[in-house]
């Protein structure tokens, strides 16, 4: 079974539109907290309520020490998913992890019907398209070279996040969705471009995002 990259990217765009997100960095935590059927709690509060020492709780999540999701078999008080997250990490790491978990939820992953590797690929594709929307990157590239400083300033995506972008294949999203997302972010990005052009030259390296921007249409 292969990941459905197009569906993951499309649902990320629809999530931005549905939540009327207009600024960067995209606050995936706020989006998740408004999502129906979801309860969000920090590791610290989860440990307190469960009567477990936090230092003993966090290692239980293995590699997912930024955030993790529990899928409940049935709804309890209108809650179907419980997402725990590590509030002590830098925001850009937290929001990327939260975006990944939001992807699992929006994509309907229940931990059983699709292989774990496929679920992860789809959730990470959703996450990157949510926090680094291609319409935003396209607006920036139309104005000046897309450097690591520009990407970090606007989306909070750097280091491991950029490596993640490079691993995502080109995806197709309905051009109408791209246009709608571009419209949402246009004011803020235009302001960033005007400010940036008045600053000294950006000497950080120009990014190669691999296939991430391939297939982008407006």
Image: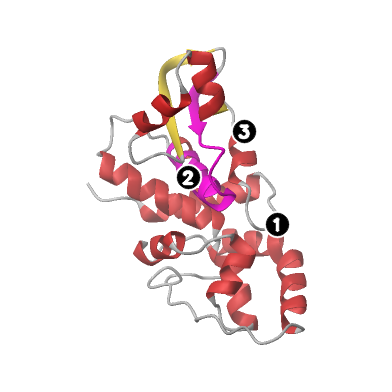
Q: Name the residue under label 2.
A: 97
Q: Mark 1 points at which residue?
A: 23
Q: Earlier in the sequence, mark 3 or mark 2?
A: 3
Residue 1 horizontal side relative to residue 80, left or right: left
What residue appears at the point 63 percent right and 59 percent down from the top-left corner?
A: 181
Give the class, few, some or many, for how many residues have Cα within 10 Å of label 3's Cα (few <14, many ≥20). some
For the question of whether residue 110 can be seen, the reply is: no
What residue appears at the point 48 percent right and 56 percent down from the top-left corner?
A: 128
Q: Mark 3 points at which residue?
A: 33
User: Answer yes or no: do the residues labelled 1 and 3 have beta carbons within 8 Å?
Assistant: no
For this rendering, which residue is in front, 176 or 87? Answer: 87
Q: Which of marks 1 and 3 is nearer the N terminus?
A: 1
User: Answer yes or no: do the residues labelled 1 and 2 have beta carbons within 8 Å?
Assistant: no
Is 88 in the magenta? Answer: yes
The magenta segment is 79-104
Is 74 in the magenta? Answer: no
Residue 173 horizontal side relative to residue 201, left or right: left
What residue appears at the point 50 percent right and 30 percent down from the top-left corner?
A: 84
- Please identify, in this view, whether the residue under mark 1 or under mark 2 is nearer the observer: 2
Where does the image place residue 56, in percent across and percent down from the top left?
Answer: 39, 25
What residue appears at the point 53 percent right and 44 percent down from the top-left corner?
A: 89
Secondary structure state at the residue bearing disc 2: helix
Q: Residue furthest left?
A: 1
Secondary structure state at the residue bearing disc 3: helix
- Please identify, in this view, whether the residue under mark 3 or under mark 2 is nearer the observer: 2
């Amino acid at each position: 079974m292969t990941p459905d990259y197009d569906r993951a990217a499309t649902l990320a765009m629809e999530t931005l539109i549905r939540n009327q997100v207009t600024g960067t960095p995209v606050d995936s935590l706020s989006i998740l907290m408004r999502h129906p059927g979801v309860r969000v709690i920090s590791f610290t509060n989860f440990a307190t309520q469960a009567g477990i020492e936090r230092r003993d709780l966090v290692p239980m999540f293995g590699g997912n020490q930024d955030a993790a999701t529990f899928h409940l078999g049935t709804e309890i008080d209108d809650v179907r998913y419980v997402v725990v997250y590590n509030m002590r990490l830098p925001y850009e790491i937290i929001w990327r992890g939260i975006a990944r978990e939001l992807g699992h939820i929006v994509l309907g992953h229940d931990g059983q019907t699709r292989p774990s590797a496929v679920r992860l690929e789809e959730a990470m594709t959703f996450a990157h398209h949510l926090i680094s929307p291609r319409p935003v990157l396209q607006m920036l590239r139309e104005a000046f070279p897309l450097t690591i400083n520009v990407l970090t300033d606007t989306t909070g995506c750097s280091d491991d996040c950029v490596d993640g972008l490079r691993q995502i294949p080109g995806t197709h999203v309905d051009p109408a969705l791209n246009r709608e997302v571009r419209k949402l972010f246009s004011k803020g990005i235009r302001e960033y471009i005007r400010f940036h052009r008045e600053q000294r030259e950006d000497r950080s390296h120009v990014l190669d995002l691999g296939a991430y921007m391939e297939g982008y249409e407006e």
